[in-house]
Image: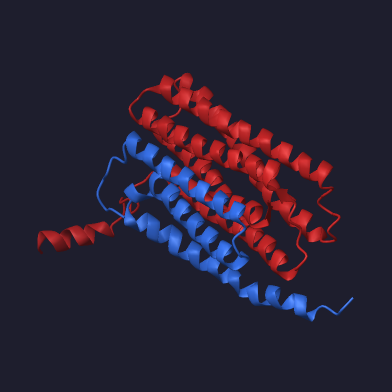
Amino acid sequence: MEETQHAGASTGTFAKIWIVLVALTGAEVLLAYLQVPTLIMLTVLVGLSVIKAALIIAYFMHMKFERLSLFLTLFPILIAFILLMLMFLGDAVRIPSMRPPV
Amino acid sequence: MSTESRAAASFWEGGRSPYATNSKKLGMWLFIVSDSLTFSALLFTYTYSRVANPNWPTPFHFSPSIIFASVMTLCLLSSSLTMVMAVDAMNRGNRKAAAGWILGTMAGGAAFVVLHLNEWLNLIRNEHITAFANEFGVPLFGATFFALTGLHMTHVIIGLIYLTIISQGIVRGKFKAEDVEVSGLYWHFVDLVWMFIFPLVYLMSAKV
C-alpha cells in the first residue's frame, strides 16, 4: 500500500496480472480434474481465490495506488464480518450426525 | 508554533479529503463492501448446506459443465482486462478508444451470460435439477445454487446495462474519466465474486 499520489500501473502490468490470473484459474481446474481429496482441495482453492481477489483489488480496482486510509476504512471490517460467518461451521458439521437414522 | 503542528491543526479544520478520492468512487466502494457481505452470506449458505448433507449432488461433469464454467471465467477475466484498458484510455483523454474497450468488456459479459444460461439449461434438462427439487434428494442444492449464481448473473446483466449507458455517454462527450473508473470498479467486483463462485461451487463438485 502506498501513500504517494501514484498515477497507477501501466497497461503492460495489467496484461501480466491477467496472465497470472488465468494461470491460477488453470491450476484450479487441474486440481478439480485430478480429484484431489476434499479438504486439501478446499484449502488450496480458497487460498488461490484469495490471491486472485487480492490481485484484482490491488491492480484492476486500483487499491494499491489509493491512500492507505481508504483501504483501512473498507477492508479490515469487511474481513472481520466475513470471518464471523464461520461461526455456523460447527452447526453445519454437527447436523449429519444429529439426524435420526432413516 | 512550528510548521508541522500548524499543519496538523489545520487538518482537523475541515475542507480536507482524507481518502484523496472523489465521492462517486467512495460511494461505489461502500456499495461493493456491502454487496460482498451479501455474496459471502450466500456462499457460506451453499457451503454449509453442502457440509450438512453428505449426499450433496455432484452434477458438474468435466465436460460440458466444468469446461463451460472455465470458458466463462476466461470471458470475465478478459473483460476485466479490457475494462482497465478503457479506464486507461479515458485517463489519457481518448474517448473513442475507451468506448471501444468498453464494448469489448460488454462482449465478454454478454458471452458469460449466454454460456451461463446454457449451463443452467443443461442442469435443468439433463440433470433434472430445479430450484426446488432434484433426483439426488437434496433440494437445498438447487435452492442455494440458483440463488447464488442467479444473483451473480443479475449483477452481470446490471453491469451490461451500466456499461451501455457509460459507453454511449462518453461517445457523446458526457461523463468524466472518474465515471468510467467507477463503472470499472463495479465490473471488477462482479469478476471478483465469480473468482469465488467458480472454485467453491463448480470445481468442488466436479465429476470427472
Percent across and percent down for residue B116 are 68, 39
Percent across and percent down for residue B177 are 40, 32
- Mark yes or no: residue B179 visible: no
| Image-quadrant location for residue B97 | top left
Up the image or down, B109 lies above or below B33; here it is above
Percent across and percent down for residue B129 are 82, 50
Q: Residue at x 32, y 40 (%)?
A: A9
Tell me: B196 left or right of B100: right
User: Which one is nearer the viewer's eye here, B7 or A42?
Assistant: A42
Percent across and percent down for residue B181 are 43, 37
Q: Residue at x 75, y 52 (%)?
A: B59
Up the image or down, B131 lies above or below B71; here it is below
User: Which one is nearer the viewer's eye here, A45 or A27?
Assistant: A27
Figure quadrant of the N terminus of chain A: bottom left
Shown in blue, the chain is: A
Q: Residue at x 27, y 53 (%)?
A: A3
Shown in red, the chain is: B
| Image-quadrant location for residue B125 | top right
User: Which one is nearer the viewer's eye here, A31 or B166?
Assistant: A31
Up the image or down, B185 lies above or below A78; here it is above
Color scheme of the displayed model: by chain
Tell me: A89 left or right of A70: right
User: Which one is nearer the viewer's eye here, B95 or B132?
Assistant: B132
- Mark yes or no: residue B126 visible: yes
Q: How many marks?
A: 0
Residue at the far right in the pictured view = A102
Figure quadrant of the C terminus of chain A: bottom right
Residue at the far left in the pictured view = B2
